Every structure is written in structure tokens, then in C-alpha cells.
Amino acid sequence: MDILTDWLTDVIVFILLAAVMDALLPSNSFQQYAKIAVGLLLLFVMLQPLWKIFSVDAEQELTKWADGVMTNEQASVITVDKQSSLENSRELFILKSSEQQMKELVQEEVEQAFQRKIVEVDIKVSSWENSFPESIEHIDVYVASLSAGETMKPVEEVAIQSQEQEEEGLENKIASFLSQKWNISEEQLNIHMVEEGDSLE
């Protein structure tokens, strides 16, 4: 808008000056040349906006445009990263809370029935829906023997496996027990017998 105002001002001022010059010049052949010169100058003044447009540094303007596009894309990437980070944090919290609750739900019964304790529960989720697990791929359960001070007397009503039972058979029994308690198929349960202090990786 400022450019248009300046341009109109220049044109009006030039026309006024041309009119004054035309009035002051004598009526002879020189006046004709003067009018031609004034006409050319007026044409130049009127075309000034076009000169400004064509004199724009195209490379500089392209660089500014590219910088603007990059800034917008970077802002979008940052927003997506933040959203993804929040979703991952929420999923991790839900997963860890579920693992802890599942462990606490059966810990005492596992100790009484099998003289074993659950060291860790690791849930592997195959897909998520709105930050909630939609389907579980499998659950790794790490089980260790009770120490001497932790050994508990078995409850009569609960089926107990003897200390001489093979480890594989014990794993199957624990898997069957947890399958009923957690309402999940045995095929999705992986029981790992570990020693206290072993790495669970």
C-alpha cells in the first residue's frame, strides 16, 4: 500500500512540474523536444513499480521462502516428536503398571503352591489402540526359587508339585496356573526359571 501511495505521489508531482515547465517554455520547436523528453520521463515514473518488481533479487526471495518452509516443517516435526514421546511414555506407564499388578495378583499363591516367586513379568504387546494394548503377543515370566527364609508351608487345597519334579514339568504347571489366573492362553506364556540375581535380559 505504501508503494502505491508513493508511486501516485511521484506521478502527480511530476505532472504538475511538467505543466509548469510547459507554461514557462516559449512556443517554438524547442518546446516540442521538451514535451517529448517530459513524456519519456513521465513514462519512466509511471513504470517505476514494474522496475522495482523486476529488480527483486529472485535468489534472495527464494531463499526466504525456503527458510519459511523449512521452519514450518521443523515445527511440524517437533510437534509430532512431542506427541509421539507423550504416547510412548503413556504406553510405557500402562505396560509397567499392568506387569506389576499381574505379578502382585498371583505372587502369594505361586509361593504357596510352587515354592517359587515371580521375579519379573514382561509383557510384549503386538499392537496398540489409543495408547492401550489391543493384543498381547506373549508374556515372559521369570521365576526363581524361594530362599530358605522365604519358604512357606503349602496350603492343603492347592495342588503342589514336589521338590523332585522336573523343571520342565514345573514350568508347565506354573504356566497352566497363570493361564487360569490371568485369563490368557498357555501358548502366550513363556516361563523362565532363573536364579536369584541372574540377569533377565
Image (spheres, helix red, strand yellow):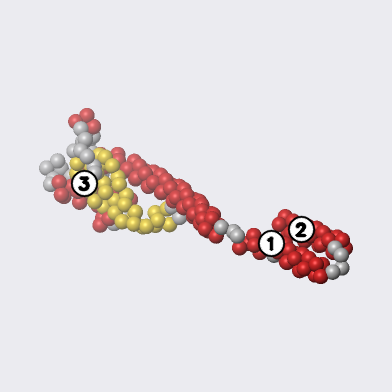
Task: Locate residue 160 relative to residue 17 in the image: left or right.
Answer: left
Tell me where residue 93 sits by quadrant.
Answer: top left
Identify the image quadrant of residue 137.
bottom left
**Does residue 155 appear left or right of residue 2 in this picture?**
left
Q: Is residue 81 visible?
A: yes
User: SS for tag 1?
Assistant: helix
Foreground of the two, 124 or 5: 5
Instruction: State yes or no: discs 1 and 2 in contact (Cβ < 8 Å).
Output: yes
Q: Nearer the viewer, residue 2 or 123?
A: 2
Q: Nearer the viewer, residue 37 or 52?
A: 37
Q: Amino acid type of disc 2?
A: Asp
Query: In the picture provided, is 81 more to the left or to the right than 107?
Result: right
Q: Which residue is mark 2?
A: 10
- Name the residue type under label 3: His
Say which residue appears at 31% left-offset and 52% top-offset.
Answer: 124
**Label 3 – label 1 distance at C-alpha:** 84 Å
Q: Residue 51 placed where, x, y %?
A: 64, 62
Callout 2: 10 Å neighbours few (<14), some, many (20+)? some
Crowding at dot 1, Cα within 10 Å, few <14 / some 14-19 / many 20+, comes out as: some
Q: Secondary structure at mark 3?
A: strand
Given this view, does label 3 or label 2 mark the residue nearer the observer? 2
In terms of sequence position, does the residue under pointer 1 or pointer 2 come before the other? Answer: 2
Residue at figure coordinates x 73%, y 66% from the top left: 40
The residue wearing badge 3 is: 192
**Circles 3 and 2: CB atoms closer than 8 Å:** no
- Reply above or below: 59 against 32: above
Measure how far apart labels 1 and 2 are at the Cα level.
10 Å
Q: Nearer the viewer, mark 3 or mark 1?
A: 1
Q: Which residue is at a point 68% across and 62% down the rendered structure image?
A: 49
